[in-house]
Image (cartoon, rainbow, N blue to C red):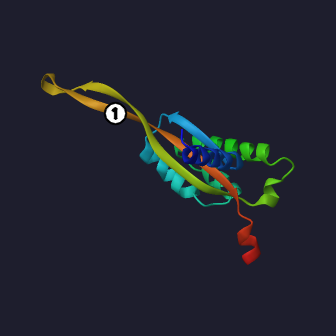
Amino acid sequence: MGARKRNRANQLKEEKQNKAFAVLKNCPTSPRKMRLMADLIRGEQVNKALDVLRFSSKESSGRLEKLLMSAIANWQAKNQGARIEDSNLVVKEIFVDSARVLKRLRPAPQGRAYRIRKRSNHVTVVLDSNNTNDNQE
């Protein structure tokens, strides 16, 4: 590995240590359905995002709520002694990527078969403290 590549890799590694994030892999929900809930909480305060997820009737909201709680716990582990209420945590990034697709066959008329694609997804949540907005208001 060259010097520039190693330096960049070390820089990315240090940035990742300072971020509070959580990742959900191989969630058996289609990415399209998961993105509906992810779009609702992107950029929101953590408490408001938890309320939105808790009172939503979608199946994916339960999984996202659990993932958000995990990201909060990761933030607390990296910021010992800091309170969530004082830090003004915000869902900085949330993105849903497609994961593996299970392919199944369904019998169809006249000896044919239709393909069923059972999709799954990966979700990543990144939290950040939003203290700069408090000073402006």
Three-letter code, disc 1: Arg
Q: Could you say which quadrant of the image residue 93 lies in?
A: bottom right
User: What x and y, as percent, mark residue 102?
Assistant: 38, 28
- Specify whether 132 is left or right of 34: right
The outermost residue toward the right is 81
Q: Residues within 10 Å of mark 1 (few under 14, many from 20)?
A: few
Q: Is residue 40 visible?
A: yes
The outermost residue toward the front is 3
User: What x and y, as percent, mark residue 1?
Assistant: 54, 38
Q: Residue at x 61, y 47 (%)?
A: 7
User: What x and y, as percent, mark residue 8?
Assistant: 58, 48
What is the number of callouts on the image? 1
Above or below, 98 against 88 in this view is above
Q: Residue at x 62, y 57 (%)?
A: 92
Q: Is residue 55 visible?
A: no
Which of the pair 92/69 is nearer the observer?
92
Quadrant for the C terminus in the image:
bottom right
Secondary structure at badge 1 equals strand
- Specify whether 99 is left or right of 81: left
Residue corresponding to mark 1: 117
The outermost residue toward the bottom is 137
The outermost residue toward the left is 110
User: What x and y, as percent, mark residue 122?
Assistant: 51, 40
